[in-house]
Image (spheres, coloured by chain):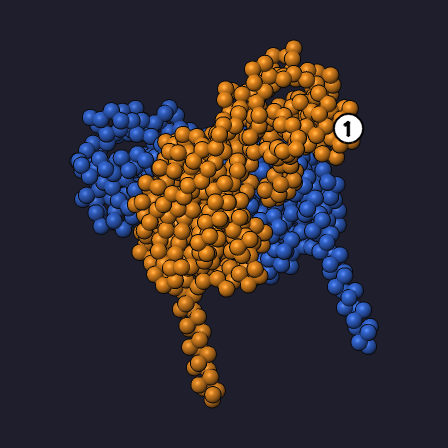
Chain colours: A orange, B blue
């Protein structure tokens, strides 16, 4: 080409690119405008949190949540269906009790999810405080047998990302009961997974090793963990009592709730936007994971309201049983594999309804780089963190199918103030922060839908 | 040089630079560690918010806050002094009343700061609702005279930065009363500067035009603004009544609280870290600006605790009277100019105690670029926004002296939920978010201290 023609050609390319980017920029701006002015995320979350409330797998709340989500999505999606899945049914029973014998102070505790109960009469034993499994091993059977083990390693407050602090401490809750049982302990107390001095305990799942005895386990509030630790320093032989009435009932049938907007060009290419519908049985599950539920529902609603006809199929999946079994996630992956469905990406929101900071990824470098190339379009909305690894628990089972996984990353600073506690209620959710999350996820879905993923 | 020598030299330079960056990186990491593990920001803010509470200029609370800050800083700083300044003394008087005549609904209102009161008996008049000053002008004296003007333009929820939404609506509060008086209005109702449906009003300062009559002005909660607007649609002639007992008393003497760590090498070069000690007379001024106060105090304490001997002088300035006069800021600038002090930077924190996002700047391009060059050191702590313009109200008067101004930018989403209201209380502050703010500002001060500013 002659220089002049080359030049014209280059200008043409530049203008095309600009025009192209401008279309995306405008669409994203409109998604945020629509959500911040006329969003349904917050009213939905108010309903889910207050009219249904907590919704542990197998509970009446979970069943009502399924009905609610289906009904609401029926008004929004092209199609909605319920995917059956058998889920565990763990029930807490009557309020837990815990105290030092000869003392009147009632400790703030709750049974860990999945724990066996002590039953009436409870258990009474001496307490051995440890910080790590190594410490436990060193003490060994002679020192542990017949005792209650008290895992009291705090989350590391100096980690900037609180999920990293959680990851560094949660082994005590997940594996602590079986590790203690290995050395003959009769019960376990775990310091709650919280970063503050708090008066309320954090529940959460434990995993019993099937080869070891199942012993009762409770979480204790961080403040009372300190009180107990101090009491033990004054009297290492003190007798501790706790009583729990939790039990695991037979599995029951529940559902993943699935809703779609059908793609207009590549309807066989599916983009999943997801969260989990179940919650622990304390509080209202507003942040965990009501926020993710309404984020996912709102992506469909925003597309619908704005008349965006997606090229690809946008599918919202509200998983059942993330908290204590992951049965919904596993069932969904089984279904995708069986049907040989083509998923081009699966996004999960399960870190609360806080101000958006970015997206984590578990994907090929090509996919990562493509998503990072959209950063200039997302940065004006505060989305700047694209470097963290990971997707989400429920979409995890899709990883072996080679599906790119993406996690929505909101600000993490307050998440563990509420996580798995009675304080995870709607008043802890900022309407705007929640809405920004919905719009952020919608923006990413829009870009993936428009441009595909390599 | 020979290639081999060049190469060695380059490696040397690279290693030096790396070593140099590593020292900064480590120091910043330690500042965050120290603050998140043993910070004093939160206990200080609990004290300021609950033991002293609100502290409008000239009030007993403000006097106690000055004493408190001086006492606490005496334990931390090399020197502390009180800089006298005469401040206005506006008092709210007994609780405001407002209702539609013939209706029982009491509206949630509060007098705007600086407003004259109606006195006993209040005022009763028809209401004219407008959204803009243009609309007011079009209506003109014939339609406005003898009426109450109701400014009801909401903050624009679609703006991502809430301060921008505030900036787009606050003219109604600041200038609305005089604009209405220009056309003969007898009173003003302003829709509160909040983004949610709220039951509580937001106070804040008005500025009377000295050439126009001073008419009483109140803010109304956003929810009641909607109720009033709807009522007016049903009955445009309705009579509205409100009664306020606020008044402006003679100026009183108060103080800026100033504390220093003396520089070891360039003690004449001063880095200011600042906030305002006064607050409105509703709530506890926890976010506005208790958070900034403890951020500033904590920078000195962190340096002291960690044994960092600053090269330059680090000066915390807690200004009096930002909310309704800016007298402290003006007095301080007068003093700096008179003493010909060399300030290399002035930082202000006055946007609440939320998760840090970055720093705004009002400075030369060289200074901006130098600060932006530190972004890789600050990004791991979530500080990614260095592009916004501005410093802070109290340090504004330093601008004509050519001093680079820097504003601490925390996440803005929840700020206007609490701003100038009874809900600005300690329970709205996240300990970790507050601490991250202190450490972020300390990190920036550290870098400026170590490297100076061009």
- Can you say whether B247 is above or below A168 in the image? above
Q: Residue at x 77, y 28 (%)?
A: A139
- Can you say whether B192 is above or below B271 in the image? above
Q: Residue at x 71, y 34 (%)?
A: A132
Chain letter belonging to callout 1:
A
Q: Residue at x 41, y 62 (%)?
A: A450
> Residue B77, image x and y in percent?
69, 37
Nearer the observer, B126 or A375: A375
> Residue A397, image x and y in percent?
53, 48
* Secondary element type, mark 1: helix
Q: Could one spot residue A29 in this view of the protein? A: no
> Residue B304, image x and y in percent?
71, 39
Residue A94 appears left or right of A306: right
- Can you say whether A16 is above or below B163 in the image? below
Task: Identify the image quadrant of residue A108.
Answer: top right
> Residue B234, image x and y in percent?
18, 36
Nearer the observer, B432 or B71: B432
Nearer the observer, A163 or B10: A163
Question: Which residue in the protein does label 1 denote?
Answer: A139
Residue A94 appears left or right of B243: right
């Amino acid at each position: 080409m002659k220089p002049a023609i080359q030049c014209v050609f280059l200008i043409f390319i530049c203008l095309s690119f600009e025009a192209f980017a401008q279309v995306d920029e405008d669409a994203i701006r409109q998604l945020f405008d629509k959500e911040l002015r006329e969003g349904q995320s917050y009213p939905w979350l108010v309903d889910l949190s207050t009219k249904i409330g907590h919704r542990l797998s197998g509970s009446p709340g979970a069943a009502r949540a399924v009905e609610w989500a289906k009904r609401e999505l029926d008004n929004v999606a092209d199609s909605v269906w319920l995917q059956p899945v058998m889920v565990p049914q763990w029930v807490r029973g009557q309020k837990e009790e815990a105290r030092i014998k000869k003392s009147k102070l009632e400790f703030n505790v709750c049974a860990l999810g999945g724990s066996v109960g002590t039953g009436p009469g409870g258990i009474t034993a001496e307490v051995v405080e440890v910080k790590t499994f190594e410490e436990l091993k060193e003490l060994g059977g002679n020192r542990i047998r017949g005792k209650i083990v008290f895992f009291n390693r705090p989350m590391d407050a100096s980690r900037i990302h609180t999920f990293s602090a959680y990851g560094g401490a949660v082994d005590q809750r997940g594996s602590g009961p079986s590790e203690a049982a290995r050395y003959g302990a009769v019960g376990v107390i775990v310091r709650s997974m919280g970063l503050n001095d708090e008066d309320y305990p954090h529940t959460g799942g434990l995993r019993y090793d099937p080869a070891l005895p199942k012993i009762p386990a409770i979480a204790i509030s961080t403040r009372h963990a300190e009180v107990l630790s101090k009491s033990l320093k004054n009297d290492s032989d003190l007798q501790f009592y706790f009583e729990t009435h939790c039990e695991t009932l037979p599995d029951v049938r529940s559902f993943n709730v699935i809703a779609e907007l059908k793609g207009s060009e590549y309807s066989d290419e599916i983009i999943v936007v997801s969260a989990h519908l179940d919650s622990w049985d304390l509080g209202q599950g507003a942040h965990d994971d009501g926020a993710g539920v309404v984020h996912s529902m709102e992506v469909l609603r925003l597309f619908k309201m704005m008349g965006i006809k997606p090229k690809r199929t946008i599918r919202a999946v509200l998983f059942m049983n993330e908290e204590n079994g992951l049965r919904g996630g596993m069932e969904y992956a089984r279904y995708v594999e069986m049907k040989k469905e083509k998923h081009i990406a699966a996004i999960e929101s399960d870190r609360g309804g806080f101000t958006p900071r970015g997206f984590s990824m578990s994907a090929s470098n090509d996919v990562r780089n493509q998503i990072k190339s959209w950063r200039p379009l997302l940065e004006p909305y505060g989305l700047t963190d694209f470097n963290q690894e990971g997707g989400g628990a429920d979409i995890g089972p899709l990883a072996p199918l080679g599906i790119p996984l993406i996690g929505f990353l909101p600000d993490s600073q307050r998440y563990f103030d509420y996580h798995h506690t009675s304080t995870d209620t709607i008043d802890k959710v900022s309407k705007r922060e929640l809405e920004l999350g919905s719009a952020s996820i919608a923006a990413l879905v829009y870009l993936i839908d428009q441009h595909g993923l390599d």
